[in-house]
Image: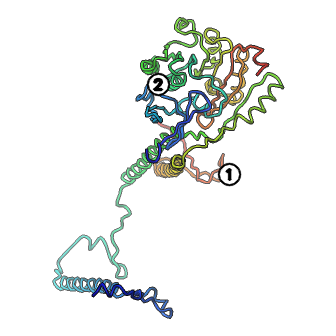
Amino acid sequence: MKGGSKVIVEPHRHEGVFVAKGKEDALVTKNMVPGEAVYNEKRIAVQNEDGTKVEYRVWNPFRSKLAAAILGGVDNIWIKPGAKVLYLGAASGTTVSHVSDVVGPNGVVYAVEFSHRSGRDLVNMAKKRTNVIPIIEDARHPAKYRMLVGMVDVIFSDVAQPDQARILALNASYFLKAGGHFVISIKANCIDSTVPAEAVFQSEVKKLQQEQFKPFEQVTLEPFERDHACVVGGYRMPKKQKAAA
Amino acid sequence: MSSLRNAISRRAHKERAQPSSRKKFGLLEKHKDYVVRAKAFHKKEETLRASLFKLKEKAAFRNPDEFYFQMIKTRTVDGVHKPESQANKYTQEELMLMKTQDIGYILQKLQSERKKIEKLTAVLHSVDNHPSNRHIYYAEDREEARELQSQASESRVTPPSGDIPDHIKRKTAASYRELEARNSRVNQLEKLYMEMSLKKELQKKGRKRKLREDELVCPTSKPVYKWRSERKR
């Protein structure tokens, strides 16, 4: 082809995530369902050397806190190809669709959402993606969906509730394997709007530490969200591994 | 014959320039330019003469009983005809409506520009730039903290991807330039919109006054007005 291709897609530091360079300079994931966009995001088709076409979807950090955290330079998201993920607060499934792209056909995403309205979009999205299992239930009562969910490697929580640490702990006690990981997005305003955001993040981290979670790192989601933070860590981490690391 | 003449190289024809002694008259006019100018001049002269003749004729055949309202509405001052004043051409309501329409247009442009920015920022993540946010690491003891500190200084630096062709780099740069231009345009439009809507509010009914410099809570360069609170039904 004369002049070369218009876009170059390179793998990102995180497995399963890619970076597209061209007219756009964006985080992308490999589309599991080529030819379909979930929330009208841009799609980028790239031709390989052997003539096969791969389609990528742009991951909008203004609509997805996970993408914002990745661009914020988080060290490890623990969501990688083949991982089993429990996603609390899936909403319409915009981020879930990208997580499903990242984990690929060998992984599973259990997406929990309470609201029926946005749950409808979630279910429609899950119809086309075999690795997404939509669950329209209250994340406060994991016992209700314990029959649907197996043990998972990672829990991603984006519930924006004052008791979100408790919700995460409850779900982790049911489904998260020992030595598994969690990613929680904290919106300061949803927990306590009267104290500064930094203090809210700190108190949430404290709460998590009391529930057998071991936070590793925290990134704020600045240019994309205001007063948001993403905390990443492990659950019931073995003592020995910590000494080695 | 002519081909033979062409075989011998002739001296190149050089145009005459304005002599330095006549430099103050500007560039030397060439004859063909003069011809165009002169023709245009004479044409205008002719039409002027013709119209003057027509006017003279009109004056000669004037009907002294003729009346137009313009004759009493306007007058001449020192021989100069003063046209009717345009100041009260529109009523207050009409002026208000026109202003509203102007503001509406600006708002529409502002919103369309905002939409375009949203679309651009959705695909321009400045992946290679350093994130401007806060990154905190949690350690259990001092040793781990020290380790993390040494690791962090290395890992935060994302290696710039080297093998990107120039034409793609140019494209990316152009996109970022477009985004920047649109951002500055939105700023300007926003400012304009605020100014226009303030003017419109000031023209409405309601008692208000400009706050003095010492009354401002947070000083700005723009004037600040305060409306008298009015009891609504």
* Amino acid marked by disc 1: Asp
Q: Which residue is mark 2?
A: A32
Of residue A242 and residue B40, the one placed in the foreground of this image is A242
Q: Is residue A159 above or below residue B67?
A: above
Q: In which chain is the residue bearing label 1?
A: B
Which quarter of the rendered picture does the C terminus of chain B lie within?
A: top left
> Taking B223 as reference, is B197 left or right?
left
In this orientation, does residue A44 appear?
Answer: no
> Taking B34 as reference, is A173 left or right?
right
- The residue depicted at 42 percent of the width and 20 percent of the height is A128
Q: Which mark is residue B214?
A: 1
Name the spot of residue A244 as percent of width and height, x first.
78, 20
* Amino acid marked by disc 2: Met
- The residue depicted at 46 percent of the width and 50 percent of the height is B200
Colouring used for the render: rainbow
Of residue B183 and residue B213, the one placed in the foreground of this image is B183
Q: Which mark is residue A61?
A: none
Q: Is residue A208 above or below residue B195?
A: above
Name the spot of residue B148 as percent of width and height, x first.
77, 29
> Taking B163 as reference, is B103 left or right?
left
Q: Is residue A130 above or below residue B96?
A: above
Secondary structure of the residue carrying tag 2 is loop
Q: In which chain is the residue bearing label 2?
A: A
Quadrant for residue A170, please give it. top right
